[in-house]
Image (tube, rainbow, N blue to C red):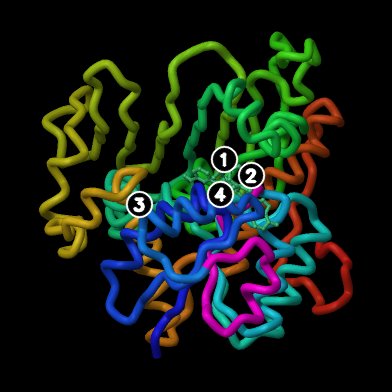
Amino acid sequence: MKLKIGLVGAGRGASYIHGFRAVTDCEVTAVCDLDPERAAKTAAVHGVEHLFTDYEQMLDSGVVNAVVLGTPQNLHAPQAALALRRDIHVISEVPAATDLMQCCQLVDAVRASKATYMLAENYTYMLPNVLVRQMAAAGVFGTLYFAEGEYIHELKELNEITPWRRRWQTGRNGITYPTHSLGPVMQWLGERIVSVSCLGSGHHYTDPRGELYEQEDTTLMLCKTEKGSLIKVRLDMLSERPHNMTYYSLQGTEGCYEAARGLGDQPKVWIKGRCPDAQSWRPLMEFADEFLPDEWKHPPEEAAQAGHGGGDYWQARDFARAVIEGRPPEMDVYFALDITVPGLISEQSIALNGAPVRVPNFREYVTGSNVIPVR
Ligand SMILES: NC(=O)c1ccc[n+]([C@@H]2O[C@H](COP(=O)([O-])OP(=O)(O)OC[C@H]3O[C@@H](n4cnc5c(N)ncnc54)[C@H](O)[C@@H]3O)[C@@H](O)[C@H]2O)c1
């Protein structure tokens, strides 16, 4: 089988091209964007044959059997459903959905389709996160019980260039962009979040029209998992400060991990019996030889060139392989919602002054019911 891929949203969508070109039996055949000039420019730069400004026309054209959804986040779930209904494979940008009704519709569409759906949570493919995942799975950190993820990315100016961010990321209050934090952390812990509490730090910035952002500057979400572990997520898209979009930590009974904070810091671990004493960290990368999968030790050139620390390459490759080999994708619809829905529920919690709110489990959703599965 050959994958004929249509990029939807010519900005972010284009960042998948290198990854797909490195996979045999994959061809990017079309670009679709409401903005014809942007579509034409991307197609010309990358030598893509077909151009569309209408998404459904592209789906019905016969020139694609898979799509990359790199459109504004409120469109991901509806556009995924339109493709899946035609048995066209989908890799969707994050988050998977912007409300719970979209989640129901997405699950309905995935269950009814012969095609594959995968969420493109590229931070799970960053090398330190992959290494920590392997070490956690090998039990190096013991029983895991606490983790953190932070996405601190000041984007007030970007809000004006891409106005959908002003509506869907900073025009709502809560953890409106949760998946880069929760993706890696939930792979490490391997358990679902069952409730969240969310609080914010208040409103200190206005947009160029003088309007306060609905989003509080920093929002903090505390999540309880099904086995009682605790996850802390910090989101900040407004505060004046340098970016730090990849901070994580993990604690277990036998050891812990802390990502780099910048200024020469490096990702580090402390592991009982593997560090000289109770106070001495070791660089995470010292464990790469022992724990990193072989292909990660000798990555192809395309991975080195891809964005987000190579993550954009690995996710495109995994999606293509899953479809071509008929395997379940690395991040299926349920995992996609496991890392999306806590953020949606945090909006209810923050409106209730941080009261804990239950997080629905979409594995229990009854097809076609549109009833949110909360127990
Ligand atoms: N995973 C990551 O690291 C990462 C990084 C950047 C962006 N993103 C995600 O990628 C998506 C796009 O972000 P961006 O920065 O490229 O935004 P953008 O606004 O620059 O690009 C979105 C494009 O989608 C097009 N579009 C809108 N509606 C459309 C429709 N109905 N049909 C076809 N095209 C349509 C727009 O014309 C625009 O060109 C967002 O969901 C964002 O969250 C993810």
The quarter of the image holding the N terminus is bottom left
Front of the two marks 2 and 3: 3
- The answer for how far apart the CA atoms under marks 4 and 2 are is 47 Å
Which one is earlier in the sequence, the residue at label 3 or at label 4? 4
Q: Are marks 3 and 4 in contact (CB under 8 Å)?
A: no
Name which residue type carries label 1: Leu
- The answer for how far apart the CA atoms under marks 4 and 1 are is 47 Å
- The answer for how far apart the CA atoms under marks 3 and 4 are is 28 Å
- The answer for how far apart the CA atoms under marks 3 and 1 are is 26 Å
Q: Which residues are magenta?
A: 51-72
Report the front residue among 91 and 138.
91
The part of the image, by quadrant, that contains residue 261 is top left
Ligand 1 within 8 angstroms of badge 1 C-beta: no
Q: Are marks 2 and 1 in contact (CB under 8 Å)?
A: yes
Quickly name the residue at label 4: 37
Name which residue type carries label 3: Gly
In the image, residue 175 lies at what x, y percent?
A: 67, 36
In the image, residue 314 lies at what x, y percent?
A: 33, 60
- The answer for how far apart the CA atoms under marks 2 and 1 are is 5 Å
Report the front residue among 31 and 199.
31
Q: Are marks 3 and 1 in contact (CB under 8 Å)?
A: no
Quickly name the residue at label 1: 230
Q: Are marks 4 and 1 in contact (CB under 8 Å)?
A: no
| Residue 224's disc number | 2
Ligand 1 within 8 angstroms of badge 3 C-beta: yes
Q: Are marks 2 and 3 in contact (CB under 8 Å)?
A: no
Which one is earlier in the sequence, the residue at label 2 or at label 3? 2
Pointer 3 local density, CA inside 10 Å: few below 14, some 14–19, many at least 20: many
Which one is earlier in the sequence, the residue at label 4 or at label 1? 4
Front of the two marks 3 and 1: 3
Front of the two marks 3 and 4: 4
